[in-house]
Image: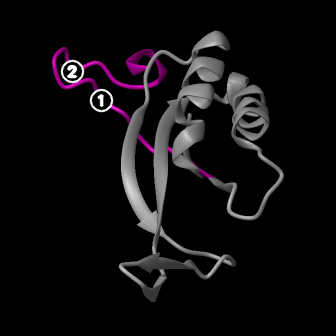
Amino acid sequence: MKWVVAIIKPFKQDDVREALTAVGVTGMTASEVRGFGRQKGHTELYRGAEYQVDFLPKIKIEIAVNDDILDQVLEVIQQSARTGKIGDGKIFVTDIAKSIRIRTGESGPSVL
């Protein structure tokens, strides 16, 4: 099993969710986060004063997936989150050592 974390632009959240649901992902967690990468933020104008916005709003999607659909999930996230502009985001994948469903106590891939 793998833990997939994707940082994407906020307006792409629904597109990514729909695409993941279509390939069989049955659950995910989404959080509103703020951050910056190569973009280094941007400037905004408020009441005539210009100021620097360093941390930009992003969405962090977290998904646990079986190894057999990992490549498909990664491809779907890339395709549905891509705008072609800087700041489209990143995807990180790590191994899951153990998983347990709290309600039943079952563990392993059946938890997904």
Which residues make up the magenta segment?
92-112
Q: Residue 85's x, y, as percent?
A: 79, 58
* Residue 20 is covered by the magenta coloring: no
Q: Is residue 66 above or below residue 78?
A: above
Mark 2 lies on residue: 105
Name the mark on residue 100. 1
| Residue extending furthest toward the left | 103
Circle 1 residues within 10 Å: few <14, some 14–19, many ≥20: some
Query: Along the horizontal axis of the image, is 102 left or right of 91?
Result: left
CA gap, disc 2 and disc 1 = 6 Å
Which secondary structure is most common in the magenta stretch?
A: loop
Colour scheme employed for the rendering of this structure:
one colour
Residue drawn at x 72%, y 32% is 80
Quadrant in the picture for residue 68: top right
Please name the residue shown 26% across and 23% down the image. 101
Dot 1 falls on a residue whose secondary structure is loop
Question: Which image quarter: residue 81?
Answer: top right
> What amino acid does circle 2 point to?
Gly
Q: Where in the figure is residue 51, as x and y percent of width and height? A: 45, 87
Q: Which residue is drawn at 49% across and 33% down?
A: 64
Estimate the x, y position of residue 53 in percent, counting from the top left.
Answer: 46, 79
